[in-house]
Image: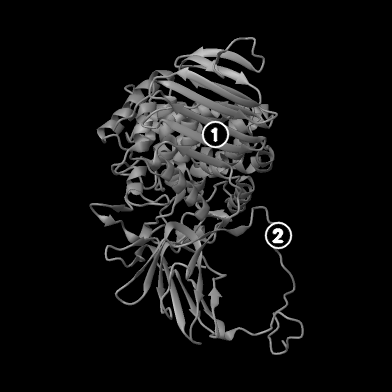
Amino acid sequence: MIMGESYDARLELEGWDLPGFDSSSWEAPDIRSGYNGDLTATMEPPIRITESITPVAVTRTASGSFIYDMGQNMVGWTELRATGARGARITLSHAEMLNPDGTLYLDNLRVAVQQDHYVLKGGGEERYEPHFTFHGFRYVELIGYPGEPDLTTLTGKVIHSDTPVTGSLETSDDMVNRLYANITWGQRGNFLSVPTDCPQRDERLGWTGDAQIFARTASYNMDVSRFFAKYIGDMIDCQQPSGAFTDVAPDAGWMRYKMWSTRLNWFAPDNAGWGDAGVVIPWTLYLMYGDTRILETHYGAMARWVDYLKDNSVELIRPNYANYGDWLSIEADTPNEVLATAYFAYSTKLMGYIAGALGKTEDRRRYETLFRDISEAFCRAFVSQDGSIHGETQTVYVLALQFGLLPNELKDKALRRLTDNIRERGDRLSTGFLGVGYLLPALSDSGELDVAYKLLTQEAFPSWMYSIKHGATTIWERWDGWTEENGFQTPSMNSFNHYSLGSVGEWMFRYMAGIEADPAEPGFSHVVIRPRPGGRLTRVKASYESLYGAISVEWELAAGGELRLDVQVPPNTTATVHVPGSGVRLDGNEISDSIEVIAKLEVQEGGSVFRVGSGRYAFTSEHVPVTASV
């Protein structure tokens, strides 16, 4: 799987698949007495070829080989067309990036070998594509080709779990559009039966922390209900007798390896933000699809996880043992005990919601009380009266705000610490895997929408746009995977297709476009539409194919300050629509009680709120945009 494929076409047996073929020389398989595992039906969508890509360029190298640029970092393989003498050997070598001298950048593969070898049988045009491997690549080196290849010689075959596309998003800003495309390509390339971390090096594991922070983004982009339901089953299969969820699922020997390895055996038996996927992902699926079955089926396993966290805490503070932390943050190490206690509180809070959704009233009250107690312990241990939080990283403030750990009198102070940190860094982020998905929501919910837009469109390092400025077509594993000053990062961990930092996609749908699920009526049976225009964007158009049908939002800001907001609500649903600005009109008319299809709920600072039924609505208002000039 990770070492490529070698195929000798000379060994093909002509007619082996036709009646009458003499197979008497074939060896018979061993017949075993039985199988003691559980045979279950396949739950998740199959992996399929979903797209074919024609290269955009081919270049001859000094050594006589040819390097193809597919124009897109992709996952799959290449189909080869060749005509040549019997016994000619062709090699296809795959890489995500090029070195400065134009050769393939292979250092980040570690021991993986992204090469396929094909030996021609001769006698006319032959076509070959591998069957037992896949690669992560944008560039392909064609070695030993007999003749002069062209752009039709190779075709890229894109593969992934065939989860139906449900989301689309387009804005007035080309770089923001590229960011969204990179997010979706990263999801496609890493959703292969399990949500893998990367598709190219010798890892390709289902890391739980990566999956949970990206789950909401993934759910907007594609229908991942079956995909993640299967993955949660993998997590529960791996759950330890103690109740701890593992870092990787399926385990694939990871737990044994990390305890044996002299480099990794000091890592904790559980990891904050990783094990919590066992609670976060089921809750996300419930929000997005409204199905209580995943909560009912896995309630016991989720409860054991929270019990484990409580039993292995000291006065509700999680221990300061080594774990992954806010993985790959930039010059901002979040203290382990702060991060772990925050996630302990969050899983407990979600368990209260889950118990409530299932009608388990006593459990709900117990989890609500425990969450309150953890929050108070968190504040006693880590929060000062001036609003500072131990570690003083962007992530500690973001998690405290988004998880609801702070009393009202400290929220504004903590928010000010967060925004000061961002401004002191030149309007740049420092969050890693666990903080990045909550960063822009925390700012937006706290009235700092302008700061959120500054971070979204920041082009200096570190930022989402920095990689795009340098040609990225997927989300990188690291903010500093490649920089102008230092070139490539440490090759042992430097994937250029790694979806975790793309969890900003959730904010793009929920806040920028304004399509939000209502926890009280999950699965979009009631839709919350609340777009938040800002920054340098003048138009956003997004849609989400819910179980009830398409939900669409399009807003556009005219130069004179008029906001146009077009909304589509699917049949058999209702929606709460927040229209920014003043002087709101519907279809060009003043809104009055005589319009039966709409009810005005309230006027809020900065806008009005309406409850509507299914249908299409065209609102206009006078809106002062929130600017975010960097």
User: Which amino acid lies under the numbered mark 1 shown in the image of this protein?
Assistant: Thr
Type of amino acid at the residue the image marks with label 2 = Asp
Up-down relation of residue 291 to residue 109 (above or below)? above
Pointer 1 with pointer 2, Cβ within 8 A: no
Q: CA distance from mark 1 to mark 2?
A: 32 Å
Query: Which disc is residue 38 wearing?
Result: 2
Q: Which element type, helix, strand or loop, lies under badge 2?
A: loop
User: Residue at image x 29%, y 74%?
Assistant: 62
Q: Outermost residue toward the top?
A: 593
- Picture coordinates of residue 546, whole percent (x, y): 63, 37
Decide if residue 548 is on the left or right side of residue 145: right
The single residue placed furthest to the front in the displayed view is 588
In this rendering, does residue 363 appear at all?
A: no
**Depicted 247 relative to depicted 551: above or below:** below
Quadrant showing the C terminus: top left
Residue identifier under label 1: 348
Q: Foreground: 582 or 135?
A: 582
* Circle 2 Cα neighbour tier, 10 Å, few/some/many (<14 / 14–19 / ≥20): few
Neighbor class of circle 1 (other Cα within 10 Å; few <14, some 14-19, many 20+) is many
Q: Secondary structure at mark 1?
A: helix
Front-lying residue, 308 or 386 = 386
> Disc 1 or 2, which lies upstream in sequence?
2
Q: Residue at x 38, y 31 (%)?
A: 452
Quadrant in the picture for residue 432: top left
Residue 61 location in percent, x, y? 32, 72
Position of residue 591 measured from the top left corner of the image (x, y, whole percent): 57, 12
Its colouring scheme is: one colour
Is 372 placed above or below 33 here?
A: above
Image coordinates of residue 544 in percent, x first then y, are: 58, 37
In terms of image quadrants, where is residue 457? top left
